[in-house]
Structure formats: C-alpha cells, structure tokens
Image (tube, rainbow, N blue to C red):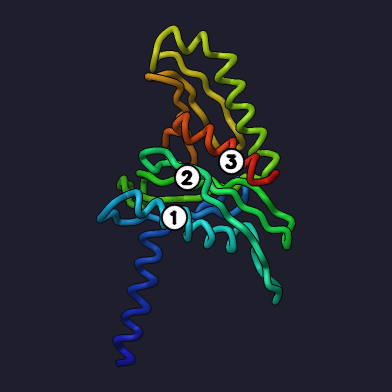
Amino acid sequence: MKNLILLSIILLLICGKVYSQNTKGTNGASAITFVPIKGDKKAVAKEIAQFRSKEFIINNVIGSTNGKDIQFETESLASDDSSGLITIAFNSNAVNEKGLLLAFFGPNIDQNGELRDAYGFRYIPLKKAQDLFVRIDEVQDNNKKYMSKQNDVNNVYMEFEDIKFVIYRDSGEQTRVFWNGFQVIWERTAFDRSKRRLDKWFD
C-alpha cells in the first residue's frame, strides 16, 4: 500500500511538470497550464473563468493571508465565440487590489515544442485596464480609413507592456492579441461588453 501511495505521488509530480509551464512576465509570476481537451471547449472555458481564475488570483494577486481572512469578488465579463479570450473583473478591499484578469485559452507550444491546448492569466490593475480599452478604441478610430482600404491587408500594431495587439478589418474590426505564446482574437462584441461591464461593475 505504501508503495502504491508513493507511486501515485510521483505520478502527480510528473504530470504537474508536463502540464504546467511557469514563466516570468512584467507583472511577476504567471503560469501556462496545458490541458487535454476531450469535450466541449466552452465547458472548459467556463471552468477557467469561474474557478481557475480564482486559483490564480489567490496565488498571484492576493498572496499570503498572514493568518487573516481575505474577502474578494470576481465577475466574468465576457468571452468571444471561440472562448479564446475571457475577461474577469476582480476586487479585494482587504488587499487594496482591483482590476481586470485576462484569461487566454487556446493553442500554445509546450516544453517539447508541441502545439497543445492551454490556458494562462494576465492581471491588469483597474486604471491601466480602463486606459487600455480607451487606447484600443482610439487606435481603431484614428486608423479606420487606413484599415478599410484593404480588408485583412492593412494592419495597425500597438503594445501594452508585454501584450501585443494587431488591429485590422475582416468583415468588421478585429483585434488579434499576442501574449506569452498565445495568439487569440478579441472579438468586437466581447471587447465592447468587457469595457462596458468593467466600468459598470466598479461604479
């Protein structure tokens, strides 16, 4: 029995190394977790938005409780049709932190160089998140004429810290987001809903 327990622990440790890849970004620790998708991707996206996001928050935003009870709130704002980018609002008066959590979900390259489904989180403090929404809108408005000349040919590139954005037109305005090996499309409907609901949630 002891040997079986020891073997189980070893297997769990091995799986943890295979399915999770830790990285360092401008916002401190972040994690990419590789997951085998055997069913509905939207069900997995729901799990990421509702539960895995909270795990990231307590480990990377709140941190140690120092023996205290820490209250915090989260609210899923929006996701696109492919579930590639999920937005989640976060607030904790106890640690004086509030902001936006971007949950990336899609193909990423693992440590063996193989393309596999994965998810990862990027936290942005509230003021910076609101400024980012405004800036993306301004870039789209300022370059609308240029992008409309040739759909999916004329692109506009902008950066926010370690996140890169390519904005273009393809049957409407599209924003492609690059971060930590992920490449996802932030659909206009999901973008507008995220911006509107984030502002409303913190009113």
Pointer 2 residue: 86
Marks 2 and 1, the one that precedes in the sequence: 1
Gap in Å between the C-alphas at discs 3 and 1? 19 Å
| Image position, residue 138 (x, y; %) | 62, 21
Task: Rate crowding at label 1 as few (under 14), some (14 to 19) or many (20 or more) other CA atoms within 10 Å.
Answer: many
Q: Are marks 2 and 1 in contact (CB under 8 Å)?
A: yes
Pointer 1: what residue?
A: 48
Secondary structure under badge 2? strand
**For residue 2, which quarter of the picture?**
bottom left
Disc assigned to residue 165: none
Up-down relation of residue 159 to residue 25 (above or below): above
As drawn, 7 above or below 18: below
Q: Is residue 2 left or right of residue 198?
A: left
Point out the tag, 3 or 1, that comes first from the N-terminus: 1
Label 3's element?
Answer: helix
The residue tagged 3 is 197
Q: Which residue is at a point 60% across and 33% down the rendered structure image? A: 160
x and y percentages locating residue 107 in the rendered image? 35, 44
Check the image and report above or below for 202 versus 38.
above
Q: Residue furthest left?
A: 38
The amino acid marked with disc number 3 is Arg
Residue drawn at 35 percent across, 54 percent down: 43
Which residue appears at 44% of the width and 7% of the height? 149
Quadrant including the N terminus: bottom left
Tell me if 108 is positioned left or right of 164 in this view.
left
Nearer-the-camera pick, 105 or 191: 191
Residue type at mark 2 is Ile
| Left or right: 157 in relation to 65 | left
Instruction: Name the quarter where the C terminus is drawn.
Output: top right
